[in-house]
Amino acid sequence: MDDKIEHAKELVAEAIRNYPRIAVACSFGKDSMVVVHIAREVDPDIKIFAVMTQYKPVETYEYLKLMNKKMNLNTTVYMVAESVPEILQDDSIDMVLLPPGEFNRKSAQIEAVSGKKIYISDPDECCRLLKVDPIRAAVSELDAWICGLRNTEGRTRVDYQEVELKGGLFKVNPILTFTEAEIWRYMSAHGIEPHPWYGLGYRSLGCAPCSHPGGEHERDGRWQNTSKCGGECGIHTQNLK
Ligand code: SF4
């Protein structure tokens, strides 16, 4: 475990040396909290950004605000929304709002045809509009981003590499080889309190309608009963630049 932490710090330090325009993506799930903590041990001023959606549970917004203050993260939040949701109104959070027109139009069309919410009938399109497009905005001025991906999270993450180049953007995954148990050990050893949903049996957190507790693998609870059960929202599979 100590070796993995040291290796993760070396990866972050090397990435900062190689790519001056770099930031850490934080979903405020357990893996993000560990990679953010490690990155800030290397560089306390490294930029942190998050993408939030209108479908994130209220507990995620509350946890974001709590940890942003506690860890002094200065998080920049990207979100498709007309205005800053009341729950995110906080001076320590820098909000970047993206116009919701396309999402509103598409979701109304899809729901009119299918009779179901967009996240049920077309979760790929929902994720594209609410997650992938905002991430594109977040990384548009970056050379590299640091993520909390891990190989053992589920079938879609087995082949990820510690450093990847996709579409002109480097992605660095410093905790790729950490196990779920090691993540919890790190959190506990460093006094990082977890998002409250882990106490309810969730193993991977996303938007409320698309996250469920339990599962054989960590990501099995994501997008259950849809075409992309246990899959990816697209931010790690598509070119972002
Ligand atoms: S996780 Fe679900 S609700 Fe969130 S953007 Fe994707 S499909 Fe939509």
Image: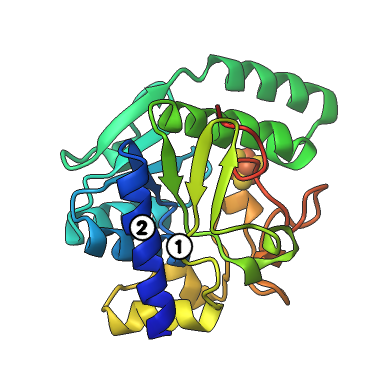
**Quarter of the render that holds ligand 1:** top right
Secondary element at tag 2:
helix
Q: Position of residue 84 (x, y in %)?
A: 33, 30
Identity, as a three-letter code, of the amino acid under mark 2: Val
Is 143 on the left-hand or right-hand side of 215?
A: left
Residue at 68%, 49% (x, y): give it. Answer: 232
Check disc 2 and report the residue beneath it: 12
Secondary element at tag 1:
loop
Residue 63's mark?
none
Q: Position of residue 105 (x, y in %)?
A: 64, 16
Task: Name which of mark 1 and mark 2 comes first in the sequence.
Answer: 2
Residue at 41%, 81% (x, y): give it. Answer: 3
Looking at the image, is 111 positioned above or below residue 65? above
Q: Position of residue 1 (x, y in %)?
A: 43, 85
The C terminus: image quadrant: top right
Is 166 on the left-hand or right-hand side of 92?
A: right
Check disc 1 and report the residue beneath it: 174
